[in-house]
Each structure stands twice: as C-alpha cells, then as structure tokens.
Image: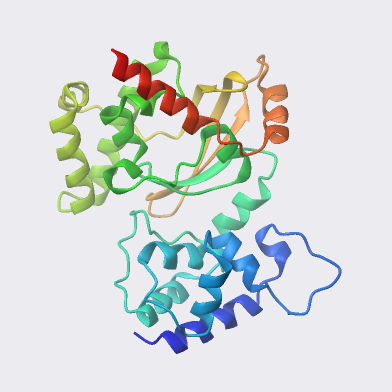
Amino acid sequence: MDLAELGAFLKSRRDRIRPADVGLPTGPRRRVPGLRRDEVAQLAGASVEYYIELERGAGSQPSEQMLAALARALRLTRDERDHLYHLAGRPIPVQGGPASHVHPGMLDLLERLDGTPAQVITDLHITLVQNRLARALLGDQTRYEGLSRSFVHRWFADPKGRISYPEQDHEHQSRSFTADLRAAVARRGGKDPETARLVADLLDRSPEFAALWEQREVAVRRDDRKRIVHPALGTVEVNCLNLFSEDGRQRLLWFTPAVGTDAVEQLELLGVLGNQDLLPAAEQAAGQRGDER
C-alpha cells in the first residue's frame, strides 16, 4: 500500500478531465485545468474532506467500493483501475461483481442519455451506476449490500423487490429473470463462485425460483416491454433496451416510452420531479403491509 503515490495518481487523473467529459457544467471561473476535488467527491459519492485526505496521502485505506467509485468518476481505463487498487493494497475485483470496472466509453454514453433513464448493470442484475432519470424512475439501485445487490435476488427473496411491477406481470418477469440468470451462469462457467452463491441462496429461499430453475429455460434478456409502477407517476409503460459489453457481463439499459401510451409525458414529468426519495418510502409502506399480513 502506498497512500502517498495513490494521492498523486488521483490528482494526475483528476487534472486531465474536463467537467463536460463527466456531465458537469463548466463555470466561467476555474482555477484548475481539470476537475476540482469537490467535483470528484460528488461524482464518487464521498465527502469532500475524505477525498482531500486521499489526495494528501493521508487517512485510512480506501475500501474496494470507494476505489470502484473513484475509478468510474475519473473515467479510468482498466489498467489504470488495476493500478489504483494496487496502490491502495486492495485485490483486483472479479469482473461481473459490484465493483466491476465500467468501460469509460459506456459511462460517457450513459451521461449523454440525459433525457432517458439509463443504467449499467452486470449479468447478475447488479446495478453499477445510474443516471439521474434512472434514479428518479427506479430509486437508487446501488444502495444494497451482499446478495441483495442483485435485483434477481431481491425479486425472489424480498417481497418489496416487486413493488415496481404490477402484480399481473410478476409471472412473466420471474420466468424472464430465471432464464436470463441461467444464461449468465453458463457463460461464466460452472466454477464461478458468485453465480454459485446466488443460485444456491435462491434455491434455498424461493420455491418459485426453484421450480422455474428446474425447467432449464435459457433466454438472454436483450429487450423487453415493461410496466413500471412509480409512486408519483403511476404505471409507466416503457421499452427496455440493452447494449452489451464484449464479454456479456455488463449491459447498458435504457428506457424509452412505449408507443401509444402516456409514457412520453410521464418521463418528461419525471425530469421535473427529479430524484426524490419516493421509492424507498413506497418500499417501507409495502414492508409494513407485509408485516400486517
């Protein structure tokens, strides 16, 4: 671990990036050639004080999650990301997990989809990064821990995981998620510990998943038409489209209005509402209803 070199490396990467490269406004008065430290902290979800300490080579060893967030904020290449982990004394994360490297080009494309809800997920449906409208439509999908980071796990193991879909659509979604997961398991190979742990836990927790898994249906989820229940907008009908990485372990998801529905006006209103903390409140209410039963 070399925290002093880590700080110098972070500063060198910060200096090369323009605000417009990462979707930030360019103000008239800038004293630095690249991003300011507070801007990097904002993009990485860290406090300004914490990031300043990192650049100074002080403070504690950063976590793997923080390193992944910094790598994405600074648009690091995979080699640069690996170097960052080496300097921090952390193991290189396995591709496909919650700390996976996201190609800078995919992040740039995500930022350019400013008027469309979009997010990058893994083949296990772990959300790595979301744009503003995706958080407004779906809530913050990056806040979960452990196996719950996978939306497939939440779908089958947690009743609150389904509140964003009408009940009439649950059977279709369950079959689709299971078939997509089986394709991911085969693509990764039988010795992949992450998929083995996820499937074993779901088989133990969910009779529904176990029954569907036994049917051995396989279908990569490339596109779909979804109805998403939003606490302020009601049911929004969208087309869900996917752009896959070369190895198939990541996909850029974006949502477009379904033709012949009110989704155009609803998504426009979504941009006005912004990222309000509506879905967590709805989840809490759903949990209370479950407790009452």
| Residue 34 at x, y percent in the picture | 70, 75
Nearer to us in this view, 291 or 203: 291
Q: Position of residue 87 (x, y in %)?
A: 39, 82
| Quadrant housing residue 113 | top right
Q: Residue at x 56, y 36 (%)?
A: 277
Residue 197 locus on image (x, y percent): 18, 46
Query: On the rendered image, what quadrant is the C terminus found in?
Result: top left
Q: Residue at 66% of width from left, 72% of height from top?
A: 17
* Image quadrant where residue 1 sits: bottom left
Q: Report the label total.
A: 0
Q: In the current view of this chain or complex, which residue is farthest to the right?
A: 28
Given residues 192 and 12, the one toward you in this image is 12
Quadrant in the rendering for residue 151:
top left
Report the side of 257 relative to 228 (left or right): right
Kindly identify the residue that appears in the image at 31 percent across and 41 percent down.
148
Q: Is residue 75 left or right of residue 121?
A: right
Q: Looking at the picture, does residue 207 appear above or below residue 129?
A: above
Left or right: 286 in relation to 37: left
Question: Residue 133 at x, y = what percent?
Answer: 62, 39
Give the colour scheme shown: rainbow
Q: Is residue 2 above or below residue 88?
A: below
In the displayed structure, 6 sits above or below 277; it is below
Q: Residue at x 67, y 31 (%)?
A: 270
Q: Nearer the viewer, residue 172 or 230?
A: 230
